[in-house]
Amino acid sequence: MTTASRPFVPHAVGTAMPRPEGPQKVRGTARYTVETPGSDALYLFPVQAGVARGRVTAIDTSAAEALEGVVAVLTHENAPRLAREADADHGVLQSSTIHQHGQYLAAVLATSSESAREAASLVSVEVVEEPHAAVLDEDSPDLYTPEALVVGVTDDTRGDPEAALAASAVTLRRTYRTPMEHHQPLEPHATVACWEDGRLVVHDATQAVSWTRQALAAAFGLDESDVDVVAQHVGGGFGSKGGTHPNTMLTALAAQAVPGRSVRYALTRQQMFDLVGYRPATVQHVALGADREGRLTAITHDVVDQGSKIGEFVEPAAAFSRGMYAAETRRTTHRVVPLDIGVPTFMRAPGEAPGSFAGECAMDELAIELGIDPIELRLRNEPEVDPESGLPYSSRNLVACLRRGAERFGWADRDPAPRARLVDGWWHGTGVGSASFPVPRFPGSEATIRATGTGDTAGYTVEIAASDIGQGARAALTAIAADALDVGVERIDLRIGDTAFGPAGPAGGSAGTTSWGATIVEAADRFRDKYGDHPEDGDEADAHTPDNPWAGEYSMHAFGAHFVEVAVHADTGEIRVPRMLGVFAAGRIVNPLTARSQFLGGMTWGLSAALHEESVLDDRFGHVVNRDFAGYHVATNADVGTLDVEWLDEDDPYVNPMGTKGIGEIGIVGVAAAIANAAYHATGVRVRSLPITLDAFL
């Protein structure tokens, strides 16, 4: 339980603050992973499998080894051995077995990246291909029930949902589909590794230096104290850099073969589609039962997920429906089809993003079936307590978000009839989608505060192994530390991104500010209790993440509402989104400057997921066909019209000392549904699979 001895009084928190690292990034002096200086550096380029399943029968590296500049070529025949803890995903170059297309079969180390790449093309590999499956089929005989989700239980049933659906005045049953999607951060995954005197030092583009340290220590049979992981600047992650992937393992393994020399490996954009995770495709069956007034009597949300045979990650899409609306009877289930492909991973709002597409589209369809305004239907099903846990909410302002958004968006002027507004050859429509995201707190972070100087002019060094992946953590944590110590932000020297500062939770789950901030506040309270407000140079205090005493008393979530206008060309089916509004209730906003960017970024990605993003698997070879930006489309400036963001002032003293809720993910939740709902309103055509493309309207 927290030992905080004084209330948190915001001064810097809530005030717009430029990023402390902003000038470095603008001037190009902020050092990213591949720019890390290294001793006698070597460059790595891999040889990858061209089949989804099989076995290497012969490998010839002689031509590659003869090329000038090549220092070593590693294969499963000569690579260092990993510890037994390394699983199939992390166990790079450990056997002749091929588990997936793109798997590492060899690694060339050379004195230049050009030589390494050329040499990799000279490695000759013979394989025996085996039968495989790479495309999601919900009728697969291999379908199974996973033991656990990322969060929460796999299945949750309350009452007899089928009986309740059969007895409902109105019953809606629909199937929705979302595709495989790949993260596309500006900075590809990259690692620089070096072994010195049995210690492993890794600079990595990671969202979680501590998690990466743990994974490397386990794979190489080391104590964690013998591994250092550094991530000073990370150029985006969106979840893909939250886990440790084969590329990091391969770089560390290669460095072990050339002790004393550093090895660097940056993935190409094409390789980003192979081994660093993705959002799995889903098939979602949703059923809603309601009375004639629109009050829900039953909800079922049954999901089939795309999975991998070599590792399990389950997209918890149905979890969105567990606490969104009031209904005494409900069922949510998850099933997985294991395939001969790579392992999925976290992608912005895992579960909530695809789950909200199905759940919020179904609510729109029910509203149309009942002849009730879509916002009014949501208001009529507002729960008094969390339907999943039965706990009261620490704060729940979804209704306020919906009403404020409707007012600003001009919802009252909307003609509810579809295909009612044709302007210059474009059908126009509007739609709404609700958003929710939990407020978790990751345990296990450690913060240290140290005085530099004496008395009223003392500065404070604050150390915590947090990761800034572009979300503005440096600014937010500097403001929190300043307010916790009751000093100006100019007196705070924040140091992050290094396991030398102790363990820390990840930048993920919209929990970074909550977890790291609460830890810093705890350390500041201990510091002030010990030294007062007039410390001596070198005075120091540390703390670990405190427990939240209210965790079992309240259900804690952020909420939001998205309002969208869509235009569909009457002749071509081309779809545009000229206007979007997001209204959020997300606790106290630490830094309005970066918070607005976070909300806008999430909304833009939601638009991108709705209209563009789809990784197309070729079942013949088990690989993604559209593996670059020529084929994998993401939203650009031309796709984004007017985006507006507003947040409601929310005082929630139960979530953490600062009163903050995560904002990194709620911005994407519900956007795709709002766009699909608006597209129906514009055209009368209901699209139940993403992405929404022009052929649906022709």
Image (spheres, helix red, strand yellow):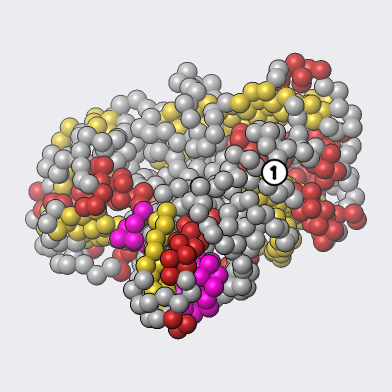
Q: Nearer the viewer, residue 663 or 434?
A: 663
Residue where numbered disc 1 is placed: 393
Q: Nearer the viewer, residue 635 or 685?
A: 635
Residue 125 position by quadrant? top left
Location of the C terminus by quadrant is top right
Residue 133 position by quadrant? top left
Query: What residue lies at 65% left-to-right and 42% top-to-bottom?
Result: 554
**Residue 560 in the image: x percent, y percent?**
70, 52
| Residue 481 highlighted magenta (yes or no) | yes
**Residue 294 in the image: x percent, y percent?**
85, 33
Query: What residue lies at 75% left-to-right and 45% top-to-bottom?
Result: 677
**Residue 185 in the image: x percent, y percent?**
46, 58
Name above or below for residue 556 compared with residue 35.
above
Name the residue at the bottom extreme.
457
| Residue 69 highlighted magenta (yes or no) | no
Name above or below for residue 318 compared with residue 446.
above
Query: What residue lies at 45% left-to-right and 77% top-to-bottom?
Result: 534
Q: Magenta segment, which residues?
A: 474-503
- Amino acid identity at mark 1: Tyr
Q: Is residue 66 left or right of residue 395?
A: left
**Residue 594 in the image: x percent, y percent?**
58, 67
Q: Is residue 238 left or right of residue 230?
A: right
Q: Secondary structure at mark 1?
A: loop
Q: Is residue 490 left or right of residue 635?
A: left
Type of secondary structure dominating the magenta stretch: helix
Q: Nearer the viewer, residue 293 or 606?
A: 293
Query: What residue lies at 83% left-to-right and 32% top-to-bottom?
Result: 295
Query: Would residue 451 be seen by someone viewing this image from the given angle?
Result: yes
Bin the neighbour count of mark 1 within 10 Å (Cα to Cα): few under 14, some 14-19, many 20 and up: some
